[in-house]
Amino acid sequence: MVILDNYIQNGHSLNPALLWEYDLKDFDWQGSRTLVVQRVIELGCPEDYYAAFDMYGGKTGFREVIKSIPYLSPIDINFVCLAFKLKKEELRCCRHRQSNRGHWNFLECSATNKIE
């Protein structure tokens, strides 16, 4: 991916708006690395990617954290697979996806179960 190929390790800083609900003074950056990487993927610009690369061991470390993210949208899944040369089977969010059972149709059920 051309945009991310311009990365050079150099004190980049993460946009604090990505983690707006947390107090960043006491934030555990290593313990919350999955959350940080997920927010960067969902909302970040190239500078945020570079900052996350700096924090988590370059592109290789960032790539390993991606594999443990519990949820990504289908668009984000396709992006990370393309940008970081991952297979969907490697991603936790694809291995543990919930089945979509749909909504319960009350009218249909009550019509077939009439009490006479």
Image (cartoon, rainbow, N blue to C red):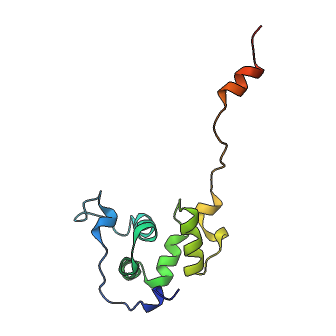
Q: Is residue 112 visible?
A: yes
Q: Residue at x 39, y 92 (%)?
A: 8
Q: Which residue is drawn at 29% across and 59% down?
A: 22
For the image, the number of numbered tags is 0
Q: Can residue 28 be seen in this view?
A: no
In which quadrant of the rendered view does residue 35 lie? Answer: bottom left
Residue 5 lies left or right of residue 91; in this view the side is: left
- Position of the C terminus by quadrant: top right
Q: Give the x, y percent position of residue 13.
A: 29, 79
Q: Residue at x 29, y 86 (%)?
A: 11
Q: Give the x, y percent position of residue 106.
A: 65, 27
Q: Give the x, y percent position of residue 44.
A: 39, 72
Check the image and report above or below for 18 versus 87: above
Q: Give the x, y percent position of residue 2.
A: 50, 89
Residue 104 lies left or right of residue 3; in this view the side is: right
Question: Quick one: which residue is furthest to the left in this view?
Answer: 25
Question: Quick one: which residue is furthest to the top in this view?
Answer: 116
Q: Residue at x 53, y 68 (%)?
A: 76
Residue 74 lies left or right of residue 10; in this view the side is: right
Check the image and report above or below for 78 versus 3: above
